[in-house]
Image (cartoon, rainbow, N blue to C red):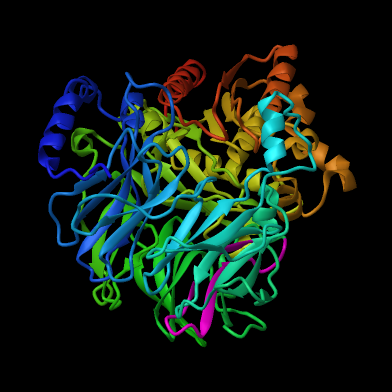
Amino acid sequence: MRRLTKTGTSARRLLVSAIALLWVPALLLAQGVEPEHIVAMEAVGQVVLSPDGGTIAYTLTKPRTADERYGRSYSELWMMPASGGEPQLIVGAPRSARSPQWSPNGELLAFTAQLDGHDRTQVYAVPGGGGDVRLLTDVPSGVLSFAWSPDGEAVAYTTRVPLPEDVVRRRARGDDVEVGSEGPQPVRLWVTTLSTGAQRAVTSPERTVRSFAWMPDASGFAVQLTESADVDAGYMDRRIFTIDEDGEHPRLLTKTDGKLGGMAWSPDGAWLAYVGAVSRNDPLAQSLFVVPREGGMSVNRTATYEGSVTSVGWFDDETVTFLADEGTRTTWNRIGVEGGAIERVLGGGREILSAPSVDARGRTFALGAHTAQHPREVFVGTVRRGTLERRTHHNSWLDDIQLARQETIEWKGADGWRIEGVLVYPLAAASGVRSPLVILPHGGPEGISLDGWTTRALYPAQLLAAQGYAVLMPNYRGSAGRGVAFSKGDHRDLGGKEFLDVLAGIEHLAGMGLIDPDRVGMSGTSYGGYFSALAATKYSEHFRAAIPYAGISNWMSFTGTTDIPYEMSIVHWDTWWFDDPGLSWDRSPLAHVNQAATATLVGHGLADTRVDPGQSVELYTALRIKGVPSDLLLYPREPHGLTERAHQLDFMRRTLAWFDRYLKSSVATTSP
């Protein structure tokens, strides 16, 4: 096969740097971040350390340039010595590679990609020292996920069940009616033996595999299965089974209720640790559970923990590790499988961590981390010392950009609840003048704003700060990072006290003398878009400008058009709209359009299946009828977000223009 590895990386970097210099100096004339910076930003993705701790592989998000055809960013694959040195490009743009995994002996690095004429994603491998790429799978319907067997002799992978031939032929002639009861095809687990190429199915074609983990002795798997293949089932209806390698005797391992996250076997295979919800209406899989291999009742080891577990692993047979969000920070922790105190290994400081990859001896690790000064980069450390050393330096031009000061603040919300948020100060506020404020609420509502790199196209915090705005990213009740009770704090009260938490944040900043409470705007996406629509309607008196993107304006029509009606209703509303239509309508921004006086720029992607574009059309139509200053942006091909360079630039430029038009007028400072 054609060799994709490149040894002349230094030459490539010089060429890239030379090209970058054609546009960077002009941008550096500005004090702070500009839209063109954001669409050119690179960021480290997955980071994996070889078993011997000597080599790091990582993916790197590579944005498209202005002269390329529109589309999503690329995902490059790189490899470098853990001790530092020049990274080596394995798969580069315009190709993409994802999910890097080292073989158990560390000789091969496997990954998924579409290479060499394949029109479907397959698993490939490259020698750890670099070399020719080898094809490991040849699956007609493509590979969704994969994992090495513990002995390295096989690869397990998931793939979608192909459509029946008669359906394929029927659709080819244009008879392509979409039937609601005929949802997506199920996903099966297969195993391919590398020495022979033999393949065998492990699960039946009736159920859908959502995730899986090899047993350490390679005798079988833990699998998360759902009866349906639709999106909602993936959130709400997973159950954990054990199954042997030949697919015989699937057995329910333990009773679970609600969302499930990652899972991992102890090295001796005696225990399975997993991240799960405590109830069906728990907004997140955020608690650490352990269950013995033979099954039975699982035990929650973080029942009193005020944080949200995000991933799980093991140090040894007796010690479970987990990554968690704590407030606006992240921590890496450990706890005994039989219980005991939670001990922090790393974190809680300025670096926002991704899941660590630990060597076979449990001594060194590599991970991705970002801070308020840079997007995610590769870091390494030792478990014993619990410190970090940076190994990559992408976006080096950021060193010449002036960034605004950022910190975590807290205030009293509704009912005296302690609320936190990330505050970005105006980069160059005029002396004696209060600054306009833009609030950027996260989505979910179970999302979280972390005190790291906060700037992206739909949440351009540093861009706004560079233009003189104070920026607040609040973690209102219902957010992750504060434990189960806090994340359930908005149940049956969406748009209620959680929004009052945000209004209290405005009052707090005004009391600091930082902002002018009469010049406040809001912009958010998804549930943050819902918040922004409420700011334009129900709470219009507090806001001069709002920019809801992909937001909910009508809870009744939303529930009938989204791909997650169960997740949104059972988890967050804790009821169905038709069981309490009065409440659902009262919390819909459209119900309060008669109060709307806020200049509102509404945006949406036309390929969004999470929040139907009709939600934005409904809001814009109502505002236009009422004579409220408003406009509508509809972006072709975009899903629940913004992925294309031109669209990202357009949205950021219009955001700045909208807020500048309606929020920028000087008001003299008065004593708080």
Where 416 falls versus 122 (above or below)?
below
Residue 568 percent coordinates (x, y)? 71, 48
Does residue 656 sit above or below 256 in this rendering? Answer: above
**Closer-to-camera residue (17/333):** 17
Q: Is residue 530 visible?
A: yes
Instruction: Please tell me in which quadrant of the rendered image residue 352 appears.
Output: bottom left
Instruction: Tell me where residue 194 sits by quadrant.
Output: bottom left
Residue 105: percent from left, percent from top: 28, 71
In the rendered structure, does residue 463 fall within the stretch colored magenta?
Answer: no
Pick whichever, 415 or 613, lies toward us: 613
Q: Residue at x 38, y 69 (%)?
A: 153
Task: Between residue 437 and residue 259, name the one nearer to us.
Answer: 259
Q: Nearer the viewer, residue 643 or 52?
A: 52
On the image, the x and y values in percent for residue 519 come to 52, 26
Name the residue located 52 percent from the left edge and 88 percent from the top edge: 338
Above or below, 627 against 484 in this view is above
Image spot of residue 505 (x, y percent): 54, 44
Q: Can you say which quadrant of the picture contains the N terminus?
A: top left
Residue at 69% across, 24% down: 173
The answer to whether 377 appears left or right of 591 in the picture is left
In this rendering, would 36 be left or right of 491? left
Span of residues in magenta: 259-280
Whether residue 519 is situated above or below residue 489 in the rendered picture: above
Give the residue drawn at x 44%, y 72%: 313
